[in-house]
Image (cartoon, rainbow, N blue to C red):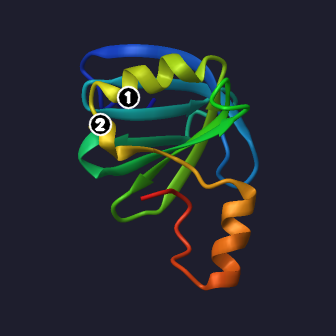
Amino acid sequence: MVQSLNTKVDLVIKGNSHLGLTDYGQIMVGDNGFEFYNDRNVRNYIQIPWSEVDTVVVSLMFKGRWIPRYALKTKKNGMYAFSSKDPKRVLRAIRKYVKPDKIVRSLTFFQVLKRAFKGKNQDNYLK
């Protein structure tokens, strides 16, 4: 069994990891980090300490009424995309440990195309 990073857990909710193929499991937000545990394979897990999280990128649809997925961009290892049953609860729990100015919107489809034609920075979030 895998040892958890967290000593105190704020939220446990069903969720999906979109790293390669979609994995179904449990998302855990606690005092030391963000964790995802796969339901089928106990050796398939993701643990991200809060000190490693650079930004949280949120994809918004229909003027913020629907959040299909969110991603955690780390300082060293790239982006990890997740979705969950109630993403607003997850983001509120994350907001306790990540500064609110580090939680940003992702670019829309047309903003990505516009930046591609202009040749600007290719980051997936607004600055």
Residue at image coords 34%, 45%: 102
Q: Amino acid at mark 2?
A: Val
Above-or-below relation of 4 to 9: below
Query: 117 or 49, which is in the foreground?
Result: 117
Using a 10 Å C-alpha cutoff, classify the residue at mark 1 as few (fewer than 14 neighbours), some (14 to 19) or many (20 or more). Answer: many
Q: In the rendered image, which quarter contains the C terminus?
A: bottom left
Above-or-below relation of 66 to 45: above
Q: Which residue is mark 2?
A: 98
Residue 14 is situated, as x and y percent measured from the top left of the image, at: 62, 19
Residue at image coords 74%, 43%: 22
Q: Tag 1, which secondary structure? A: helix
Residue 35 is situated, as x and y percent measured from the top left of the image, at: 44, 33
Residue 94 is situated, as x and y percent measured from the top left of the image, at: 38, 28
Q: Which residue is mark 1?
A: 94
Using a 10 Å C-alpha cutoff, classify the residue at mark 2 as few (fewer than 14 neighbours), some (14 to 19) or many (20 or more). Answer: some
- Tags 2 and 1 in contact by the CB under 8 Å rule? yes
Q: How many marks?
A: 2
Report the side of 89 relative to 84 (left or right).
Answer: left
Q: Which mark is residue 14?
A: none
Residue 92 is situated, as x and y percent measured from the top left of the image, at: 41, 21
